[in-house]
Amino acid sequence: MTIKLNVIDLPKDDYTAGKSTLCPGCGHDQISTVIINSAWENGLKPEKVAKMSGIGCSSKTPAYFLGKSHGFNTVHGRMPAVTTGAAMGNRDLTFIAVSGDGDSASIGIGQFIHAVRRNLDMVYVLENNGVYGLTKGQYSATAVKGSKKKKGAINQHQPIDLCKLAVNLGCTFVARSFSGSKKQLTSLMKAAMSHKGFALVDVISPCVTFNNNDESLRSYTYVKDNDVELHAYDYIPTYSPIEGVEVPEGEFHDITLFDGSTLRLETIGSDHDPTDAVAALAALHKAELENKHVTGLLYFDPTKSTAIEDQCLVDTPLADVPDDIMRPNAASLEVLNTRFRGND
Amino acid sequence: MTIKLNVIDLPKDDYTAGKSTLCPGCGHDQISTVIINSAWENGLKPEKVAKMSGIGCSSKTPAYFLGKSHGFNTVHGRMPAVTTGAAMGNRDLTFIAVSGDGDSASIGIGQFIHAVRRNLDMVYVLENNGVYGLTKGQYSATAVKGSKKKKGAINQHQPIDLCKLAVNLGCTFVARSFSGSKKQLTSLMKAAMSHKGFALVDVISPCVTFNNNDESLRSYTYVKDNDVELHAYDYIPTYSPIEGVEVPEGEFHDITLFDGSTLRLETIGSDHDPTDAVAALAALHKAELENKHVTGLLYFDPTKSTAIEDQCLVDTPLADVPDDIMRPNAASLEVLNTRFRGND
Amino acid sequence: MERIVNDFQLNIATANGTGSQSANLVLLHTMFSMGVPVSGKNLFPSNISGLPTWYILRVSDRGYQAPGDRTHIQIIMNKATWENDVESCLPGTLILFNEDAKMPIDREDCTVIGVPMTKMARGLNPKLGRMISNMIYVGLLAEILELDQGKLNDAVANQFKGKERAIELNLEAVNLGRAFINENVDTAMIPYRIEAREVDDDVFLIDGNEAVALGSHYGGVGLLGWYPITPSSGVAESLIAYIPEIRCDEDGNHLCAVIQAEDELAAVGMVIGGGWSGIRAMTATSGPGISLMSEFIGLAYFAEIPGVIWDVNRTGPSTGLPTRTQQGDLSMLYEASHGDTTHPVLIPGSMEECFEFGWKAFDIAERLQSVVFGFSDLDLGMNRWSCKGFEYPETPMDRGKILRTQAELDAIENYGRYRDVDGDGIPYRTLPGSGLDPILYRGTGHDEDGIYSEKPEVYQALMMRLKQKMDNARTWLPQPVLREEVEKEVGIIYYGSMENSIQEIDDILEDEIGRKVSQCRVRSLPLSPVVEQFIRDHETVIVLEINRDGQLYGILRRELANELIPKVHSAAYSDGMPPRARHYSELIKGVLKEVGQ
Amino acid sequence: MERIVNDFQLNIATANGTGSQSANLVLLHTMFSMGVPVSGKNLFPSNISGLPTWYILRVSDRGYQAPGDRTHIQIIMNKATWENDVESCLPGTLILFNEDAKMPIDREDCTVIGVPMTKMARGLNPKLGRMISNMIYVGLLAEILELDQGKLNDAVANQFKGKERAIELNLEAVNLGRAFINENVDTAMIPYRIEAREVDDDVFLIDGNEAVALGSHYGGVGLLGWYPITPSSGVAESLIAYIPEIRCDEDGNHLCAVIQAEDELAAVGMVIGGGWSGIRAMTATSGPGISLMSEFIGLAYFAEIPGVIWDVNRTGPSTGLPTRTQQGDLSMLYEASHGDTTHPVLIPGSMEECFEFGWKAFDIAERLQSVVFGFSDLDLGMNRWSCKGFEYPETPMDRGKILRTQAELDAIENYGRYRDVDGDGIPYRTLPGSGLDPILYRGTGHDEDGIYSEKPEVYQALMMRLKQKMDNARTWLPQPVLREEVEKEVGIIYYGSMENSIQEIDDILEDEIGRKVSQCRVRSLPLSPVVEQFIRDHETVIVLEINRDGQLYGILRRELANELIPKVHSAAYSDGMPPRARHYSELIKGVLKEVGQ
Ligand SMILES: Cc1ncc(C[n+]2csc(CCOP(=O)(O)OP(=O)(O)O)c2C)c(N)n1
Ligand SMILES: Cc1ncc(C[n+]2csc(CCOP(=O)(O)OP(=O)(O)O)c2C)c(N)n1
Ligand code: SF4
Ligand code: SF4
Ligand SMILES: [Mg+2]
Ligand SMILES: [Mg+2]
C-alpha cells in the first residue's frame, strides 16, 4: 500500500498529533480533524505553522493536531496578543489559532477586536458551543437568549455574535460553519488558511456534556428514549459526534443535538455577495430573528493591508535576522553621542 | 431678578460644579454644559444621580458638572463594571457616565460591550476625539484611517465605530452627535437620560490640542493665517469652542477644526426608522465610506428588559434595605444545619 | 490475622466523568455516618472526562485527615494509569482491580483480587456499565470492611436524591459487589475493618466553598460578581443556589444580585461599585483572577472602598495545576497592586471558619473601608471536611462608619470624606443617593475632603493614615488559635488547610523524637501581636506552609522584632497535593537537628 | 554684598501649556553649557493645560542634583498658586513676578521685583504674549545671574530648532528681559551669580526614557508593544523616533516592529509572543500597567519566555499622582503574579546605566529565559540628567541557550525543552519555524519535555529548578556599586534615582555630625552576595528609598543572614517629590541616634 502524499510530499500523519482528551463526541475534535485535513490538503509546511490558543476545552486542541508545529497554549482570552507578538517576530509562519466562545467573547473580546482591527495575519478558529466547557457548563456570551441550563437560571442576555462584530470591524474574512459539516468546514478552513490577513472561522461546535438544556426545551422523543434519570452528576456519557451535516446553498436543515434540542443551520445562498458588508450584516440579523444560524463565507475583503504589511518590516523574519544586523553598528552610536554633545 | 427653576424647583446652579481644568476650547467642556442643561431641564434630582468615569481628559469632566451628585472617577477603561456594581446596589440612581474613546474603544472595549449586552441602566457619554488627550495625543482606536498626526506615523487602522458595535449588540439606545451641536446634543442627551437601559451618546468632541493633523491635511487658508511656526511644543493655544453647528435633518455641513482640517456632519433623515437595526448599520457604513459622520438617534429598542430588571431584585435599593432583612434570620440557619446533619 | 480497625488508607484510581465521584462520596458518607473519622481527597485532572483521577480515603480513629504515608487498599479501574498504580503499591497492599480492563497485574507481594466489574455492571444495565462498575467496588469494600448496610443505603439515597430508579440500580450494584466477595474471598485474610464509633449527631460533611457561600449570605451579601475558575466556582454556584431559599422576599424578589462577569477585572470592578454604593459585594476567584484584579485592588485601597474577594488558591504560577491545591498566593494578596499597599487577609482553617469569615469579612471590609481577602484553597474549598454546624453571627452587622442622615453628618466636627476625625485612621463616608456631602471619588491623590491634590504633604499624610489604619487592625482581626505546651520549647506556626495535617505531625514528633510542640494557627494578616508573643515565648519556631517560598515566613521576617528572627524557621513544601504530615515532620526534624534541639 | 556663585536654587511657578517648559529648558541648557553643575526638576500636573507647574533649578558647584532645602530665587507667574508661592518663600528670597497678573505681593523680608512681563511680551507679538512672557523671565535671570549670551543663543536655537521666526522672537524677549533689569534693577544688591566652569565636552543632558529607548535599540529590540501611560510614554516615543535613523535597512524597511496595543495586558502579551518567536521584545509602562500585566508575567515565568518590561514608576497606589515620582513598585516587580514567582529587576541610577541596562536587559532575559524588569521612575525618566555619553555594548548579544540547528540539538544528550542538562537551572530552547523539537508551550504544569503533567514530583522539581535558576543569577546580574570608607562604621544602601541626592546627604552627614558613610548602590534583584558582604562589613546599615514601606529593606530582611538583620535600618520616605537630601539625612541621623552611633 502506498501512503498518500500531499503537494509537498508529506503523508497526513505528519499533520496529526496526540490523542484527544476531550469528551467523546465533542464537536471540537471534529474541528481538529478538519484542521489536520485542511493543512495537509493545502500543503502547509508543518514547521512553518504556529498553533495558538487560550484556555478552555477548545484551547486544548492544539495538542491534538499538527504535532510537528510549535504551539503556545497561552492564558485565558489573551491569545491574540501573543499571536501578534509572534507574528511580528516571524512573518513566515502561518498562525492557526483556536479559541472558545468564553475565551473570545467574554474575557478575550478586546483582544479579538483589536486583532481583527489590525488585520493580523492569522486563522482564528472559534469553537463556539455557547458554554464554558472546561469550567463545567456556565453560559458563555454567545449562548442563545432564553436558553435554560439544568443548573442555573435562564440566560437573559442577547448573544454576542462574533461574525457580526467582525464584519463591522472590517474583518477581511468572516465565515461560519458547523463542526459536523465536514465538507463545508474544510473548504472554508482551507480558504482561511490561504487568506492573507485575519480569517475568522466561527464553528458551531456543540458541547456534548454541558449543553444540556432543560427538559422543557427538548423534544418529546428524546426525553422518552433516554434514561437520563439514571445519570450521576459526575457521569459524562459517550456520544458519537454529529456528522455529515451538509446543507445545500440557500437551504436549511435542523439538527438534533445530544440533549434533544434542535439547531437550524442555513447555508448562505450563492446570490450573497461576500464583499458587501451590509448584506452580510442583514443576513446575520435576519438569521438571528428567525432563530437559525447562517453558514458559509459571509464577508471577504482582499484589499486591506495586513498587520505585518503595515509594519514595513524587512522581508526576512526578524527572528532570523543576524544579531549584528539587529544591533546598529558602533559608528551610529558615535554619531548620536556627537549630536547629543552638540558637536555635530 | 427671579432665578429660573426647573420642574423640581431647583435653579440651574444646583447642577453645576467645579471649574474645568481642560484646555480652553475643548469639546468636552461643551458636553459638560449640555449634561448640566439636560439634567436640569429633565428635572433629575441631583442626589439621585451618580456620575461615573474612567481615566482621561473626558473622564475628568464629572468634576465639572452636577456637583451635588456623588461620582466615581475609577480606573482606565473599567468604569462600566463599577457602574454595574453600583447599579445593583442602588437601583434608584440615574447613572451618567463619561468616557473617552481611548477609555472605551481600546482598554475598555470589553466592559463597554458587556454593559451594552446586559442593557445596564445608564447613560454612556462617549467623548470621542480620536486621540488620547491626557497622555498627549496618541491615536485612539476611533481615529480615522489615514489621518496623520504631526508626531508619529500615519494611522493605518480602520476606526472602531462604537455606534456600529452597539447596534449589533442590540444596544437599546444609540445616538451620535457633535459637541458643538448644542441643540441636537441636548435633545439626545435628555432622551438618553429618560431611557430605561443602556443609552449610548457618542459625541464627536474635537481635541483642540492634539488633534493636530499634518499640514498636508489642512486647508490652505488655515496654514496661511496661523503662525504655528512660532509655537513651542509645550504651548497649548487657547481657542473658542466650535459652537452652533446645527445641521437640519437629512442634510450635511462641513466644520473646520482648530487645525484647519474639516469634518463633515450629516444629520440622519426623518425617514430613518430607528427601530431598524440593519437600516442603522447601513447608514453608518454608508457614512464611513463617504467620509462623514451621521448624527441623530440611530437605533432605539424600548422592548428589552434592563440589567436591573433581569435580576428580579426587591424594589427598595439594596443599599437601603435594613441589615436585619439583608441577613437571613437565625431560624433559617437552623433549618440548614438540621438538613446538613441529615436530621430533617 | 490481626485486624486493623479504622486506621488505613484507600486509594481509588479511576477516570473522571465515569461517575466514580458518586461512588467515592457514597463510601465517604457511609463511613462518616458510622461515626468513623474519615476524610476524602479528590485528585482530579483539569479536563472534563476520561483522564486519571484518584480518590484518597483516609480512615483514622486518631482523626488524621490528610493523606498518610501509604495506601493500604488500592482500587484500580483506570487503564491509563494502570502500570503506575500497580507499581506504586507498597508490599502488602490489598489491590482490588477491574478484571475486565484486561490489564496485567503482577504483584505477588500484595493481596490481589480481580473482579469482573464491567461485566457485572453490564448485567444490571448494558448502557451504563461503565458508570455502575464504580458502584461495584463500593459493594466489594462494603463487604470487606463490614460497612453498615443501612448507612450505605442512606448514603446512596442521598447521593442520587430523588432519582428512584438510580437509587435502586446503584444499590443492586452494591449488592453484586458484596456477593462477589462473599462467594470468592476469604475476608478473614484481610485485616482492614471499619467499626462504627459513637456518632456525633451535630457533625456533618461539607466543602469550604459551600460554607463560604453560606457565610456570605449570613453576612448579607448584596452582590456577587464572578467569573468561573476552578477551584472557586463552587463558592459562586453555592451562593446562587441558596438565593431562592434564604435571600428572597415574600414575592420571590431577590436580596442579592448575581452577575457572571466577562472576566475577573469586571468582577472585581462590580464589587467595588457595589461597595461604593453601600451594599456588601463580593467575588470569588483563584490566583489568575487575583493577578487580573490587581489594578482595581489598588483603587479600593486608595479610595477606601469595602469589598470582599475570596481566593480559592490552586497551584500556581500561571495556569499551573488548576485542579491541585496550594497556599501560593498569600504574599501577593497581602500587598496586591502597585505602590505601597496592604490588605487584610482572613485565613479560615475549618468549615466553621469558612462560614464565620464568610460573614465577618464584610464587617471587616466595611469597618476598614478596604478590600478584604478570604484565603481558602482547593483542599478546603472542594473537598468535604467535617463540620460541627454553623453558628449564627453573634453580633449585628458592623456597617462601619457610614453616615446616613444630615444630623449624623452635622454631629461630626470638621467632617471630610478622608479626614481622620476619630484618630483611628478610619474616616466616615456617605453614600451615593443620600445627597450627603457628595464628592467625586477617585484613585488619584486627594485631600481630606476628597478633592484632587498633588501636594506632597497631603499625599504623605494620607499614606501614613492608611498605614496606621491597617496596623491598628492587627489587634482586632481574627486572632490566632494557640495550643501551647507547658515546655514552650518548639512552636509551630501554620494556617489554613494545613490544619488537616497538624495533629498527625504532632503525633509523629511525639512518637519519633519525643517532642511536644506548641501550635499557633494564624488566621489573619496583618499579623496579630499574639503571633509575635508566641514566638517570643518559644525557643524555636517553625512556620509550616504549602508553597515553595515560605511566604508567611517571609512576612514574619519582615515584620518581627529583630531579636526574634533567628528563632524562626521555614518548613515550606508544595507539590500540588494536600499537605502530608510526613513531609513536614521531616522538615521539622531537620530544623530541630540543625538548631541542636 | 557677598556674591553667591553657583550655589542656589530657582523655583519657577507657572501653569502648564504656557510654553514655560521651553523657557525652563533654555535656562537649564544655558547654565549646563557654561559648565555649571545644574539640575532641573519639572513638577507638572496631570492635565494638559492651565494647571500649576513648578520647575526647580538647582545650581551647585558641589554637584548636588536634587532639590535642596530652600529656594533662593522664586519666579511667580501663576495666579492660581500666587498666594502659596508668595507665602512659601523664606525671608531673603529674591522674588521676580509678573506684574501684569495684578496679584498682591507683600513680602518686605524679600527682594521683590515686579516686571510687566505680559505687556512686554505682547509688545513683541500680541497673540503669543502668554507664551513669550516666559522668555522674558529667562532674560531677567540672564541679566541678573550673568548668563553667557552666546550660550543662551545656542540654547534658544536648539530649543526651537529650525523655526527661524520663533528663535528670533524668543531672543528678542530675552533681550527685553535683560534690558528691564539693566534699566530698573541694581544687580549689585543681588548676590546670586552663575560663573562659567570648565566645560566637559563629553557631557550632555538627556532624560532616562530616551536613554532606555536608545539602549533598547542597541540591544536589537525587534518589537515594542506598548500602551501610553505617563511617565513611561517617552520610552516608546523615543524608541519610535529613532527607528528611521538606526533601525532600517537600505530600502527603509524596519528591523523593529512597533504596536500601540489596546491595553497593557495586550502589550505584555505581545512581548511574550515576540520572545517566544525568537526576537527581543519589550514594553514600557508604569505601576497600573504592571498590575494589569501580572497574569501574563506569571506565564512568562512558568513557560520560561524572555521579555523586557520597563516600569517607569510614578506615585501610587492606584492612579495616584501620575506626574510625580516614586520607587513604590519594587517589591511588586520582584514577585509579580500569583503563586511562587521571582523576576530579575535591573535598577539604573544614571543615564549611562539607563542605556546600558536598556540593551543588557535583553541579554539577561534571553540568558534566563525570563521576563526582566527595568526599574526607572519619573525623575530618571522625564527629567534631564547629565550623561558622559553612551558606550557601545562591549560584548556581542548573548542570545542565551537557543538551539538553531539539528546538529546543535543532537549534540545535547537527553534534550528536553525544560530539562536542565547543564546543571545551571537553565534549559535549552528551539524556535517556532525551525521545525526543531516542536512542542506546545503552556502555562500549565509540564515535565522536562514540555508535556502536560500534574505529577507532584514533576511539578516540585520544576519549581525548584526555577528557583535555582534565579538564585544563580545573583552573582552575574549587574552588581552593586560600592563606595567604601575606611572606617566602615555606617553604610548606606540605596538605588535608582536616589543617586541624585546621595552626595548631598553624604556632605550633610559629614558637615553636621562628622560622619563619613560608605555607600552601596544596588543595581539588581535578586540581590547580589556583595550586598550582604557590604552589610557584614559595616556596623550600621541604612536603606534609603523613595517609598512608604521600605520595600528594598523588606526584601533585605527576608533574604539576609539572620545575624545581619539587626544592623539594617530603613529610611524610607515618599511624598511624590524627587528625594531631598534633608529628609534622608534627618532619618539617618535619627537611626544613628537610636543605635547610639
Ligand atoms: C484568568 C482566568 N480566568 C478563568 C479561568 C478558568 N477558565 C478556564 S477555561 C474557561 C472558559 C472556557 O470556555 P470556552 O472558551 O468557551 O471553551 P470551551 O471549554 O467551551 O471549549 C474558564 C473561565 C482561567 N483559566 N483563567
Ligand atoms: C491602566 C492605565 N493605562 C494607561 C493609563 C494612561 N492613560 C490615562 S488617560 C489615557 C487615555 C485617554 O484617552 P481617552 O479615553 O480618549 O480620553 P481623552 O483624554 O482623549 O478625553 C491613558 C492611556 C492609565 N491611566 N491607566
Ligand atoms: S465539556 Fe463540552 S466542550 Fe469540553 S470536551 Fe466535553 S463536550 Fe467538549
Ligand atoms: S488635551 Fe484635548 S481632550 Fe484633553 S483637555 Fe485638551 S483639548 Fe481636551
Ligand atoms: Mg465554549
Ligand atoms: Mg480621546
Image (cartoon, coloured by chain):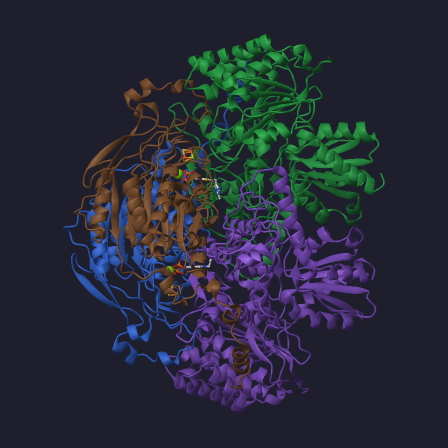
Chain colours: A blue, B brown, C purple, D green
Residue C37 lies left or right of residue C50; in this view the side is right
Above or below C213: residue C570: above
Question: In which quadrant of the rendered view does residue C378 lie?
Answer: bottom right
Residue at x 77% of width, y 62% of height: C534
Instruction: Give the total of numbered labels.
Output: 0
Between B212 and C380, the one nearer to me in the picture: B212
Above or below B201: residue C49: below
Please state the quadrant of the image where ligand 1 appears.
bottom left
Is residue A177 at all visible to an observer of this figure? yes
Between C499 and C49, the one nearer to me in the picture: C499
User: Which residue extends farthest front?
Assistant: B1
Between C54 and C503, the one nearer to me in the picture: C503
Above or below C331: residue C217: below
Question: In which quadrant of the rendered view does residue B81 lie?
Answer: bottom left
User: Which residue extends farthest left?
Assistant: A271
Placement of the C terminus of chain D among the 4 image quadrants:
top right
Q: Position of residue D275 (x, y in %)?
A: 49, 41
Q: Position of residue B242 (x, y in %)?
A: 32, 32
Placement of the N terminus of chain D among the 4 image quadrants:
top right
Q: Position of residue D393 (x, y in %)?
A: 58, 27
Above or below B88: residue D65: above
Is residue D303 at all visible to an observer of this figure? no
